[in-house]
Structure formats: structure tokens, C-alpha cells
Image: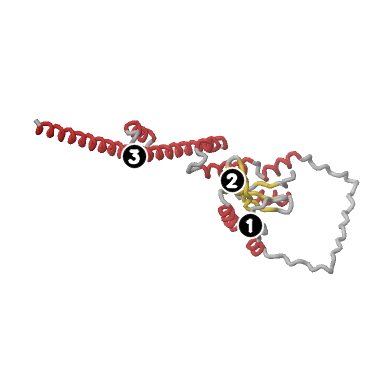
Amino acid sequence: MKRRRAAGGAGLLGLTALLLIAGCSRERIDWKSAEAADTIQSYNRFLERHPDSELAPQARARMAQLTEDKDWQRAVAADTVAAYETFLQRHSAGKWAEEARIRIESFALEGNPSPLEVQNAEADAAPPPTSAPATTSAPAAVKPITVSDSTQPTPTPQPAATRSATAPSDSTAIRGFGIQLGAFSTQSAALSEWKRLESTYSRELRGLRPHAVRAQTAAGTLFRLQSPVEDETKARAICAALVKRTQPCVVVLPQSR
């Protein structure tokens, strides 16, 4: 009798062990299947079958990443400010969040009319010049005499390359007129882009210095690549030349405006 009970107990333990092994094997098989498919649906099926598995957190993390990737592809396909803002509402700290913020800021450049369009619009709106009567001759303009102080030494112009290399690259906002060439996630990225642009557009950017201006926007913290320019006319001329060469550029107006 005792032998039968012992044999029965051993059989029960053996059966339990077999069930545990089978369960672990089933879980591993389902996990391998989920990994092979690598879809939101496959990981969801694994979680439905094995909610308490030690692999459950890994499955949930992969589902979250796949969901973000899917939402990012949808935002890129739409390529609008609204699409990127919707993406950020769902994945504010995700893998593509920084890229979404940069793209939103870049629309500020693309959304503004180019300097060429502004100049053309102003030219179209300007009234046609009226010709003076044939019998009337316009008096010659008198050139004003400029008196310079001979006691002050004339400053020697600094070469553009030297001035650009020694100019500070700070993050202070521009007080007067300027130009903006892009927006970046870090200050170093903005200044690195300036070096590339300065090499590519050496004539247009000659004598200018970069400012990576920190800005807190609805899309997050960005650094706007700007450069101060002496007046609005020059700023628009520089942007017009850059836009003509397919480089985005926006005129920066004084903050008081």
C-alpha cells in the first residue's frame, strides 16, 4: 500500500514537472514566434497568453517602440506642423521626439515668403514711374561734402575669414536685424551647420558671425542659427541670394517690432 502511494506521489510530481516544462516550452515558442513576426499584433498575442511572463515587460516595450515608429511614419507622410504636433502629444519623450521638434521649427523658415517673393510683390504693387515733361530738366543733385576727422586713424578692414574665425559664437539674442538659417536640437549642431554653410556660401555670408540662439518653443528647446546684419536692406539681400541657391533663409526683425 505504501509502495502504491509512493509511486502515485512520484507520478504526480513527474506529471507536474512535465507540465511546467511544457508550459515553459510553450512560452518560449510563443516568444520566438512574436520576435520573428516583430509586429504589434504578435507581441499583443504573446501578452494575452502569458501576461505574467518574465518577458512581458520586454514585449510591452517593443510594442511601444513599434507604435511610435508607426506614428512617426504617419507624421512624416503627412509632413505638416499639425501631424508633428500630434506625434509629440503621444510620444513627447520618444525616439523621434527631437526630430519632430526640429521639423516643426523648420516650418517657420519654409512657411515665410522668401525674400524674392517679397521683393517681387513690392515691385508689382509699386506705381509705375511718371516721366517728367520734355521741356523741364531736373536739376543736378548736389553731392554733400563729407568732412572726416583726420586726427582719427582709419580702421584697417579685417579680412572676412579672420573676422569670422575670431568672432564669438554665443547664444545671445540678436537685438537688431539679422538672418535665420535653421533650427537645431543643440548649440553645437547649430554652429557645426554654420561652418558648413559658411564654406558653401562664402560670398553671401562673408563677414557675418553665427549666433546659436536658445529658444523655448511649443515644440521644445531649440537653437536657432542666426546672424546679425547691419540693416534690413542687407538682410533681405542676403536672404534673397541664399534662397536663390535653395538655402532657406528668414529675415530676423528687431525685437522691438
Tell which circle, 2 or 1, labels the residue nearer the N-terminal end.
1
Mark 3 and mark 2 in contact (Cβ < 8 Å)?
no
Q: Nearer the viewer, residue 4 or 33?
A: 4
Q: Nearer the viewer, residue 56 or 42?
A: 56
Left or right of 198 in this view: 91:
left
Judging from the image, what secondary structure is the residue with disc 2 in? strand
Judging from the image, what secondary structure is the residue with disc 1 in? loop
Vertical placement of 255 versus 150: above or below?
above
Mark 1 and mark 2 in contact (Cβ < 8 Å)?
no
Q: Amino acid at mark 2?
A: Thr
Q: Amino acid at mark 1?
A: Ser
Could you tell me residue 234's position as x and y percent? 72, 52
The residue pinned by badge 3 equals 54
Q: CA distance from mark 2 to mark 1?
A: 18 Å
Crowding at mark 1 (Cα within 10 Å: few <14, some 14-19, many 20+): some
Could you tell me residue 214's position as x and y percent? 62, 49
Left or right of 16 in this view: 241:
right
State the count of labels: 3
Q: Nearer the viewer, residue 101 or 177?
A: 101
The residue pinned by badge 1 equals 169
Crowding at mark 2 (Cα within 10 Å: few <14, some 14-19, many 20+): some
Judging from the image, what secondary structure is the residue with disc 3 in? loop
Could you tell me residue 131's position as x and y percent? 84, 43
Tell which circle, 3 or 1, labels the residue nearer the N-terminal end.
3
Tell which circle, 2 or 3, labels the residue nearer the N-terminal end.
3
Q: Residue at x 57, y 49 (%)?
A: 184
The residue pinned by badge 2 equals 221
Q: Amino acid at mark 3?
A: Glu
What quarter of the picture does the N terminus occupy? top left
Could you tell me residue 4's position as x and y percent? 10, 31
Crowding at mark 3 (Cα within 10 Å: few <14, some 14-19, many 20+): few
